[in-house]
Image: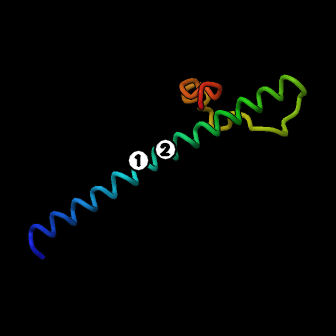
Amino acid sequence: MTNRKAGFLMFLIFGAFLIVSKADKQDLVAAEFRYCSDVVIWNTHQMTDGSSDYGHPDYKGIYDDVCKELEPHDQP
């Protein structure tokens, strides 16, 4: 394999890694948003009707750190 082909192959591999890492970051943010939304829903139903059928409590203990940056009502 010539140096030019090897360089092009390395460029393609590097580009693929960049695309995959960006998708992973988007998936992480989406998962955190879903988690935060479910905690808000759970808290709302706990206050209004005492139900725990919707959402879930902050079982990871990250709501105060992570979710304040991702306020669910501010998301599109």
Colouring convention used in this rendered image of the protein: rainbow
Q: Picture coordinates of residue 56 (x, y %)?
A: 74, 38
Q: Is residue 66 above or below residue 27?
A: above
Q: Which residue is mark 2?
A: 26
As helix, strand or loop, the secondary structure at mark 2 comes to helix
Where, by quadrant of the figure, is residue 46 drawn?
Answer: top right
Q: Picture coordinates of residue 59 (x, y %)?
A: 68, 37
Q: Does the CB distance between marks 2 and 1 fall below 8 Å?
A: yes
Real-space Cα separation, disc 2 to disc 1, in angstroms: 6 Å
Circle 2 packing at 10 Å, graded few (<14), some (14-19), many (20+), is: few
Residue at the far front: name it.
Answer: 76
Image point 45% across, 44% down: which residue? Answer: 25
Image point 15% across, 68% down: which residue? Answer: 6
25 on left or right of 49: left
29 on left or right of 14: right
Image point 13% across, 76% down: which residue? Answer: 1
Image point 56% across, 42% down: which residue? Answer: 30
Q: Which residue is mark 1?
A: 22
Amino acid type at mark 1: Lys
Q: Is residue 24 above or below residue 12?
A: above
As helix, strand or loop, the secondary structure at mark 1 comes to helix
